[in-house]
Image (cartoon, coloured by chain):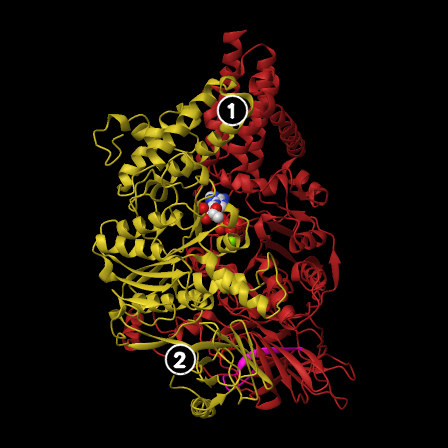
Amino acid sequence: MQYSTIERRKECKKEQKPNRNDEVRQTPSMEERIVGTVQRVNGPVVGAKGITNAVMLEMVRVGEMRIVGEIIKIKGSTAIVQVYEDTTGISPGENIYGSGMPMSVELGPGLIGTIYDGIQRPLESIYAMSQEYIERGINLPSLARDKTWDFIPASVSTGTIVREGEIIGTCQETSQILHKILVPPGIEGTLTYIAEEGSYTVTDVIAKVLPKVSNAAGGASKGAAPEEKELTMMQTWAIRKARPTAERLPLGKPLVSGQRVIDTLFPLAKGGTVVIPGGFGTGKTMIQHAIAKWCDADIIVYIGCGERGNEMTDVLTEFPKLIDPRTGQSLMNRTILIANTSNMPVSAREASIYTGVTLAEYYRDQGYDVAVMADSTSRWAEALRELSGRMEEMPAEEGFPAYLPTRIAEFYERAGYMRLLSGEEGSVSIIGAVSPPGGDFSEPVTQHTRRFVRCFWGLDRQLANARHYPAISWLESYSEYMEDLLPWWEQKLGFQREKDRTEMMELLHREVRLQQVVKLVGPDALPDSQRFIIEVCTVFKNAFLQQNAFDDIDRYSTLEKQTRMLALILLYWRRGQDAIKKGITIVRVRKMRALQDVIKMKFTIGNDQMELFDKLEARLERGFDQLESLYV
Amino acid sequence: MSNQKPNQMAHKIKKKLLSSREYIGVDQLDGPLVFVKKTHPVGYRELVECVDSTGHVRLGLVLDTSEDVVVVQVFEGTSGMSLPETRVRFMGEPLKLSVSKRMLGRVFNGLGQPVDGGPQPIGDLDLDVNGKPINPTAREYPRDFIQTGISVIDGMNTLIRGQKLPIFSGNGLPHNELAAQIARQARIKGEDTEFAVVFAAMGVKHDVARYFIQSFEETGVIDNVALFLSLADDPSIERLITPRCALTLAEHLAFNEDMHVLVIMTDMSNYCESLREISTLRGEIPSRKGYPGYLYSDLAELYERSGMLKGFKGSITQLPILTMPSDDISHPIPDLTGYITEGQIVFERDMNGRGIYPPVAGLPSLSRLMKDGIGENMTREDHPHLASQLFAAYSYVKDVRNLASVIGEEELTPLDHQYMEFGETFERIFISQHKGENRTIEQTLDLGWEALSLLPVEELHRVTEEEIETYYGRIAEKDYDRIGNTK
Ligand SMILES: Nc1ncnc2c1ncn2[C@@H]1O[C@H](COP(=O)(O)OP(=O)(O)O)[C@@H](O)[C@H]1O
Ligand SMILES: [Mg+2]
């Protein structure tokens, strides 16, 4: 129902932004094939009967409103449809229309910089149709049909054989991303036509391939003579199926995040997987945002799954303004957003994870390193639980279906560092947040996810409450990639760094035991040499581990800066230890002026000011020299 | 909508016609649920009218629909209804509320019907109470600082216009006083727009409702307030609709009438219990503590109906109140709320016991939107660092207090003693204030510095040299009187 003031709203909006939708978009023609009728409606689960030629996982449209759904069970002539939109008003007897296709996404130029909902509907185009609120049954193409791209053919000539995954051309998608046009998986044959350089839309034919004889290439293959396949810059892919690659390669390069606690203590590898569990307000989203902003991936796919609307708005307003330090380009030029916020339909949450990872795989197939953030996978698991419950399936732990672990494993397995069909290399890394109820890590989603990922950044409520951010617990977290990455670190940053790192970790573990003593008998019971361990760890936490995401300098640190900072803190440790051995009291050591500068160095020394570390180091040494000359 | 397909129109018309059909007699009654067999095709979540033998009409909603049986949830409950005599009409559309600005200054029941003796206000629009999801691209990121005049909120957990910031309280704690104080004092710095208040009461006692009404009357804002009351003795299922009615009106006021609306919803715990009641009756598989798995999504449907929209002047700020069962913050109700809202104000029983008002726990409280609404040109340039330093120092105080309780205060180091003193002072002059006291943001920040100045300057890692230069140890010299803090 429209507001009476709609005219005023429209006027208001015209001033705000240009109308991006002057001509009415052609909605893709929909097959009017009735495959069954509604028998029962229970939330997002619709029972169907009279099912004729529908297939498993086929995308369907339900009722006269044509809301989107997917067939998830078929039994005789009945079926269950998982509906991706609100089912209010749908009644028994309404028709169900088949699409003949599984739930798929459109892949091609135009994905980057776009925000989609969980089933890849372009939210900005929907908004441009003057809708603040998302109506049901909207049917817009995911990739704009009217936009043209400058296609440049690769050096392939007609008459040669092309294979799946092969690059047949390129177009500049954003100033930073060269989009490679690939032969879709399942197609192999003789190239009979390749378009000349020029402007094309995603539906214009840019190549034709005559498939090899009787090669049962995917899709609807007919037994008869092979038909020429027309290729466009766009292809489609079913979201629940991983895209094929040639081979999985071992991991050996870090995904540098610019977050000190991560890169230095618990690094992630390109192609790796990590889980970030944490109660509300412990900083899951902030970590995901920070990595999305500063990590050294080529492409970011950010999936907001069942979380806050304003967080997506935040990304949308902030990213275009931020500059990627590596390329000098706007961060939005490498980012794709999938938003299925907590008030949007539950079952589309379930799909959003797969939509996101499929887009990521597509860019990987072009030879890029892609990082996928999923915030939060718990909402996805809960969507599974709700659907399962409404289908009256037998629950396992806490009402979750028994197949939860399988689904989690399948999802994280889509990450990896791959040799591609084109022969190049590319990777998908997955960074999944988990929101355990009550912050209790023993719940099923945290536990099962832990089994299938190799890196764990556990967020600690106590740290978050003390405003120690990122609240990644240094005692509970781990990274199994440490070993794999060692050769890379040593080659890039020398051998000392790993020694420093190990020494610091040891101190942190010794501190825990000392703190237990302090809690029982007070700090005075410890000798200065032991109190100094606590002191150094406090400095390390304040000066190094804590990183303020809102500070222009501190928000990300290069590896070099991280290494220098760590080295300085360890210098303080070594010299301080000596000084205390010589009888200087801990109070005097703490009062040193240079120490204040060490604690504030994260805010004062920029990533391009490494020479200031030399100065600071000299000052710290001088401070100790003076102290020792005065008091010995 | 104009671009509806012809068959879609025909479909609607057919539904309208069928809605005049009336079914006499129902097949089963179970708590608030009514089961009706052999109906025409009925839509999911359609509005239902059940007429009992006395002719009294009760509203309900379709929870499950199939060819064989339709399950209806009746808001007023089914007591007094009988199987053969109940008549049922399916209305062919969801529950709607007729909204207008004229509803301000009026009192309604939980379903939006007037109960103040006045006539039904003339509506401008009929809106579906369930609302629709806001497109995230249509949102405007909220960043306007609201001055509540309460230091612990303004200074450390800043409220932003368009934010949803709940109060996590417990039985017997002064959450109503704090909510009323916020509603009275909330101002935008440098503007004098007033907030319209939409108040939704769910399962609270009469005196709570009376307290709020009185408080609004005393300050003369009652004409800018609409109240939706579903009190403790009203049928519990009605509570599921009450916040939806309130938010529907709030959306109309904010986005059609350009108003800034503050929505107070109390007590969300009662709302969640009603939801559990229905879920249990339907034999659904529960997740934790018997609450349904969809509690998160259901709460999100309410809490996400707040914020600001691009190109619109108005806004909806939400202040939901919930009482944590046995003060347990990990209970599903506060837990799921915290996962959806943009922060939380957490009450601490111990502080209340020590006579501190408002008893806001320093550490677990959080405002997630604070970062973009404070600092230079918004509050004061030192605000972000000051707040961060206060959090860090106060958190150390908590550690020291724990230590002192084990080893005794005498055993503490001199530095730890200074922290203890800081902690006391901070709670006494900064957090504590009078229920009528309205501090400016400058006063709040100065009080923060006054407390911090009790710590040695080397301890202040989170503020800059310049800030120390300007504010550290200087506040006491400044000459101003602290309103209402004479003791
Ligand atoms: N690195 C950080 N720097 C500064 N503040 C942070 C940082 N990480 C988290 N925070 C604070 O914590 C709040 C909650 O973080 P968020 O990531 O939204 O938590 P979650 O997603 O776990 O609920 C943020 O609003 C912010 O105030
Ligand atoms: Mg979050």
Chain with colour red in the figure:
A
Q: Nearer the viewer, mark 2 or mark 1?
A: 2
Kind of residue at badge 2: His
Image colour for chain B is: yellow
Tell me, for residue B457, which label it has, or none. Answer: none
The verdict on residue A153 being magenta is no
The answer as to whether callout 2 falls within 8 Å of ligand 1 is no
Counting from the top left corner in percent of width and height, residue B273 is at 51, 60
Q: Is residue A170 visible?
A: no
Which amino acid type is marked by label 1?
Ala
List the residue tagged with mark 1: B404
Residue pushed farthest top? A632
Look at the picture and state if A504 lies above or below B277: above
Residue A371 in the figure: left or right of residue A7: right
Secondary structure found at label 1? helix
Which residue carries the number 2 mark? B56
Percent coordinates x, y for residue B33 in the rendering: 53, 74
Magenta region: which residues?
A: A62-72
